[in-house]
């Protein structure tokens, strides 16, 4: 059993606690030395992604500039905003005529964002939405039935980083439909996935891969059967059908490096899809 499997075997609350304990020495030293940026959370409080928090945020923002054509005056929606990884660089980009909305299923992330971002940037708003997700939060509220708390045609840009990689098909379909509803005409949505086709399906399920999806659920594959939301990969044909049902239009696809399909300097770790509301 690898470390990832052990991590998934414990409860969501325990996962947060383990990380807090593991990074306590680093966070304590930063506190003693007063060396931490106010807009960077303690490492023990970060529950999304890896690497340097600030640098990762800047990198994801650069993807929005390059592929979603985000503008300073845009109204943007950050779905699964976490603990503000992309919101932080956007504070230095969006003008007062622009606005930011973000929501997440993890309350501690929203609380941090309200305390460290929203207080100083009144056009940034964060909402805690207690939806069920067996990786982060257990409740009876299902994402497949969730209606985004925003009017139709509200946003120029919508984005989701490492969100659809933790959602089941019915949930993804509902989010596609809701994204279409809240996007303005010609608005863009950038999101990340783990995508596969018939050609690479056997490769991504091999035991000797450190990052693999061994459990076949027909049209999608799971990394961990006991925690279905841990990581999920979708067959491209199946996902295309879901996109068509939502009326979104796929404008761009950039393969990431996770399945060795990325090309040159264009790739991220996950696969990137860009949609448009025509």
Image (spheres, rainbow, N blue to C red):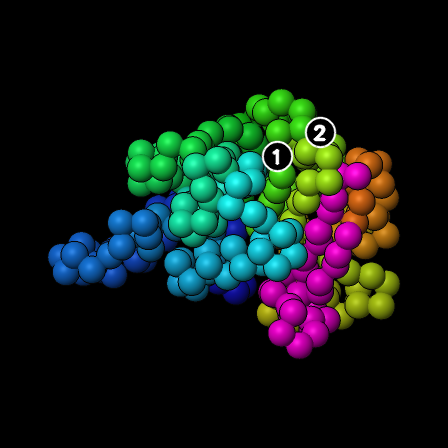
**Foreground residue among 244 and 72:** 72
Q: Which mark is residue 155?
A: 1
Spatial distance from mark 1 to mark 2, Cα to Cα? 10 Å
Q: Position of residue 6 (x, y in %)?
A: 49, 56
Report the residue at 48% width, 35% height from top: 97
Q: Is residue 183 left or right of residue 90?
A: right
The image quadrant of residue 30 is: bottom left
Using the image, determine if residue 13 lies above or below residue 36.
above
Report the residue at 71% width, 51% height from top: 274
Q: Position of residue 220 (x, y in %)?
A: 77, 50
Q: Position of residue 175 (x, y in %)?
A: 68, 35
Q: Which mark is residue 181?
A: 2
Q: Residues within 10 Å of mark 1 (few under 14, many from 20)?
A: many
**Foreground residue among 158 and 19:** 158
Magenta span has 259?
yes
Q: Is residue 44 left or right of residue 234?
A: left
Q: Is residue 27 left or right of residue 161?
A: left
Q: Which mark is residue 23?
A: none
Taking the view exactly as shown, the residue that stands out farthest to the bottom is: 264
Mark 1 or mark 2: name the one nearer the start of the chain.
1
Please say whether residue 82 is visible from this viewpoint: no
**Foreground residue among 151 and 162:** 151
Using the image, determine if residue 59 lies above or below residue 101.
below
Magenta region: 251-278
Q: Total of numbered circles in the picture?
A: 2
Please say whether residue 200 is visible from this viewpoint: yes
Report the residue at 40% width, 49% height from top: 92
Magenta span has 261?
yes
């Amino acid at each position: 059993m690898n470390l990832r499997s052990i991590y998934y075997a414990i409860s969501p609350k325990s996962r947060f606690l383990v990380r807090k304990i593991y990074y306590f020495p680093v966070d304590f030293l930063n506190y003693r030395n007063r060396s931490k940026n106010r807009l960077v959370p303690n490492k023990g409080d970060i529950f999304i992604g890896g690497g340097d928090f600030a640098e990762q945020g800047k990198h994801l923002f650069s993807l929005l500039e390059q592929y979603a054509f985000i503008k300073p005056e845009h109204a943007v929606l950050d779905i699964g905003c976490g603990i503000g990884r992309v919101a932080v660089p956007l504070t230095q980009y969006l003008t007062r005529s622009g606005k930011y909305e973000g929501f997440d299923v993890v309350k501690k992330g929203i609380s941090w964002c309200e305390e460290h971002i929203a207080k100083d940037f009144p056009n940034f708003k964060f909402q805690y939405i207690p939806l069920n997700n067996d990786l982060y939060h257990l409740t009876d509220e299902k994402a497949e039935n969730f209606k985004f708390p925003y009017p139709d045609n509200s946003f120029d840009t919508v984005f989701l980083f490492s969100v659809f990689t933790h959602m089941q098909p019915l949930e993804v379909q509902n989010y596609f439909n809701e994204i279409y509803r809240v996007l303005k005409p010609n608005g863009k949505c950038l999101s990340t996935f783990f995508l596969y086709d018939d050609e690479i399906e056997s490769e991504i399920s091999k035991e000797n891969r450190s990052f693999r999806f061994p459990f076949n659920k027909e049209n999608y594959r799971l990394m961990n059967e006991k925690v279905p939301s841990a990581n999920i990969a979708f067959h491209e044909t199946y996902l295309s059908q879901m996109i068509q049902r939502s009326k979104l239009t796929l404008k761009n696809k950039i393969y990431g490096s996770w399945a060795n399909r990325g090309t040159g300097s264009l790739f991220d770790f996950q696969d990137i899809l860009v949609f448009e509301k025509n």
